[in-house]
Image (tube, helix red, strand yellow):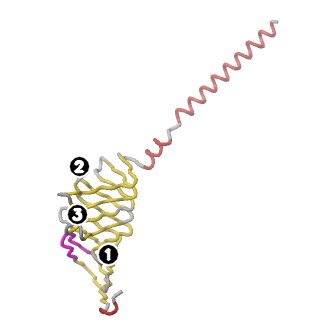
Amino acid sequence: MRTRRLRAALLVVVVVALAGIGYQVWSAVDARRVPAAEKLAAELLPHVAQHIRNFRRVKVKDGRTVWEITADEAQYRKEEEQIFVVQPRVTFYLEGNERQARLRGSSGKIILTDGRELVSVVLDGDVVVQLDDLELRTTLASYEHATDRITAPGDVAIKGRRLDLRARGMEVDVTPQNMRLLDDVHTVLAPQGDAS
């Protein structure tokens, strides 16, 4: 009987010891584990206050749409007061919404004051600017609201119905749609009958 009690006591001690070791291992692993969402935020989105899919901002004044910005994704960084966007598209509505100037790119950043007023847009990647029947392609373009101007410092290719043009550097005044080509301009004009 004494050996039975000794065996039972020894079994209880072993079970308690194993339970203690198991608890210590579990608490050490749990302390090192970071929830997946927190880990993703820490690694991929540092300093991001908001991450938005299907981003859209519109400015309406006196019942008329002035501009619209859309993007596949956006990240608002509060400390920088900037919105970083993927596949952005910017549309400026001119002359009672009948004419439009459009910009699109692979990525970019937008600065809005108070989340409402557009200050500037910088687009990079495959940037396309569309003005009436002209399509302008470049790798970097920016829009400044204060001057109402789109600028592209690098190489620009412009295609129209009867026009094929290449230049280095471009400025477009958006509302009157005046364009200035700054350097190394090469133009090919198609005859009237060859228009496509």
Looking at the rendered structure, the kind of residue marked 2 is Asp
Q: CA distance from mark 2 to mark 1?
A: 31 Å
- The picture places residue 185, in percent across and down from the top left corner, at 28, 83
Element on which disc 2 rests = loop
Dot placed on the residue nearer the N-terminal end, 2 or 3: 2
Magenta region: 170-179
How many other residues sit within 10 Å of disc 3, few (<14), some (14-19) or many (≥20)?
some
Q: Chief secondary structure of the magenta span?
A: strand
Looking at the rendered structure, the kind of residue marked 1 is Leu
Which sits in the foreground, 11 or 78?
A: 78
- The picture places residue 76, in percent across and down from the top left corner, at 33, 50
Would residue 175 be counted in the magenta stretch? yes
Q: Which residue is under mark 3?
A: 144
Q: Which mark is residue 136?
A: 1
Residue at 24% over, 78% down: 181
Residue at 23% over, 72% down: 172
